[in-house]
Image (spheres, rainbow, N blue to C red):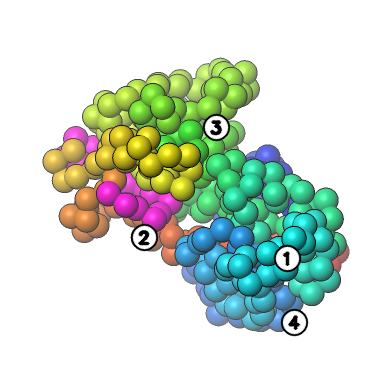
Amino acid sequence: MRHLIQPEDLSNQEYMELLEATAHIQAHPDLYKERAKGKILGSLFFEPSTRTKFSFDSAMLRLGGEVIGFSDAQGTSSQKGESLADTIRIMSGFADILAIRHALEGASLLASKTSRVPIINGGDGGHQHPTQALTDLYTIYHYKKKLNGHKIALIGDLKYGRTVHSLIKTLARFDVDSFYLVSPEELSMPRHILDLMEDRYPNIKIHVLHEMEPAIRECDILYMTRIQKERFFNEADYLKLKNSYLLDEEKMELAKKDAILMHPLPRVNEIAIELDSDPRAVYFEQAAMGMYVRMALILKLLEEQDD
């Protein structure tokens, strides 16, 4: 049985196949209206979500399938003390595929050990978010027509940001030129990820910075992230760092004319609203593309399960 728990669960060939499948679905959605007819997605979101949950739900509905689940664990038996493993055992008897988001790192991996159907990790704590990485890859592929050779800036919360943890490990596999890692010192990329990059991808240049401007000038892709209040243990630390980086019109003038500006959303105050009309700002299109990406992924895992 195939699950998607972390980016390493897919080969490079499978990534490219999914990107091509996503492009075809986006161009010809009517051809896919009944591809998952009779199938049920269990949408199990123990942690708040807008884009990820509803893109999964709408993906399944557009494929002709149905959706059950919850977006608030308060109404589930987990509040009575039921273990995650038991919840998954029960839900995998009701649905054909499960998408799960949980605040605890490793929750999706645990779920995969007891599930009878494919599990898709919709985000586990500050650890992994593979479907967001797949969405980000498709966005870059869509606008840049290739994945290799790019200079990429990851800006903001690189310590707790599960989207950037998955993205850097995934993009590195496609021969990018360099990463510019821009963050406050307190929110820098975890050492184990930097060590992995150095060991596996010695040809990729890594620039660790605390100022945005050099990265903005040099990079083809600017990937902003918010400072995540929910990951801090005390509010004072959050308040000290929350306004560390603000990308506005003046700073964006430094960027290349063909750069693209991405963000996994939600944004708080790190991208000025005035940039929404900049043609290089693609974050809302990026979110919309996530639905097509998840349509392609759901079909792949369901078809493999049926086989």
Q: Nearer the viewer, mark 3 or mark 4?
A: 4
Residue 36: image quadrant is bottom right
User: Marks 3 and 4, how far apart in space?
Assistant: 38 Å
Q: Residues within 10 Å of mark 3 (few under 14, many from 20)?
A: some
- Return the residue at label 2: 284
Secondary structure under tag 1 reads helix
Q: Nearer the viewer, mark 2 or mark 3?
A: 2
Secondary structure under tag 2 reads helix
Q: Nearer the viewer, mark 3 or mark 1?
A: 1
Mark 3 touching mark 1, by CB under 8 A? no
Along the polypeptide, which appears first: circle 2 or circle 3? 3
Image height of 39 relative to 221, above or below: below
Is 304 in the magenta?
Answer: no
Residue 69: image quadrant is bottom right
- Return the residue at label 3: 172
Mark 3 touching mark 4, by CB under 8 A? no
Quadrant where the C terminus sits is bottom right
- The amino acid on which the numbered mark 4 sits, given as a three-letter code, is Gly
Secondary structure under tag 3 reads helix
Which residue is pictured at 18% across the width and 38% down the height?
251
Total label count?
Answer: 4
